[in-house]
Amino acid sequence: MNLKIDSEFRNICSEILEHNLNLENWAEIESDDMFQTENYAGGFDGTELEFCFSYFNEKKDEFWFQFPLSEVSLIVKGQIETLNIRPADV
């Protein structure tokens, strides 16, 4: 299932870029709840070596998705417009 990237998530990715960390630095400070907004919660996972997030829709159903550091700037620039999400209970 695809989710259109909104300004709320784009702002999270901008914040990730502001940290100006490489993959090794992110792995050292991994935190699964570093970024929390109304509809998103997540952070960097050192095992997956990717950012792992939950998305909560208007009914508060939870969905999971993850993406590599290399895609963060593409999301901010609007070059990636959708996220592949899956229900959290699957």
Image: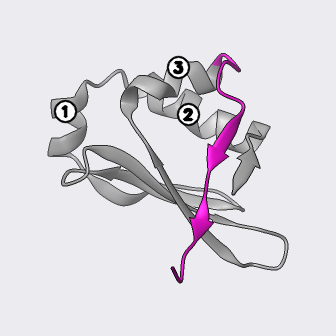
Residue 78 horizontal side relative to residue 31, left or right: right
**N-terminal-most mark, 2 or 1:** 2
Image x and y of residue 27, in percent: 19, 43
Front-lying residue, 2 or 61: 2
| Residue at image mark 1 | 25
SS assignment at label 3: helix
The 10 Å Cα crowd at callout 3, few under 14, some 14 to 19, many 20 or more, is some
Residue 70 horizontal side relative to residue 21, left or right: right
Q: CA distance from mark 3 to mark 1?
A: 17 Å
Residue located 19% across and 33% down the image: 25
Residue located 57% across and 20% down the image: 74
Q: Which image quarter is the N terminus in? A: bottom right
**N-terminal-most mark, 3 or 1:** 1
The 10 Å Cα crowd at callout 1, few under 14, some 14 to 19, many 20 or more, is few
Q: Amino acid at mark 2?
A: Cys
SS assignment at label 1: helix
The 10 Å Cα crowd at callout 2, few under 14, some 14 to 19, many 20 or more, is many
SS assignment at label 2: helix
Q: Amino acid at mark 3?
A: Ser
| Rendered position, 56 above or below 40 | below
Q: In the image, is residue 56 part of the stretch drawn in magenta?
A: no
Disc 2 to disc 3: CB gap under 8 Å: yes
Q: Amino acid at mark 1?
A: Asn
| Rendered position, 11 above or below 1 | above
Mark seen at residue 82? none
Magenta span main SS: loop
| Residue at image mark 2 | 13
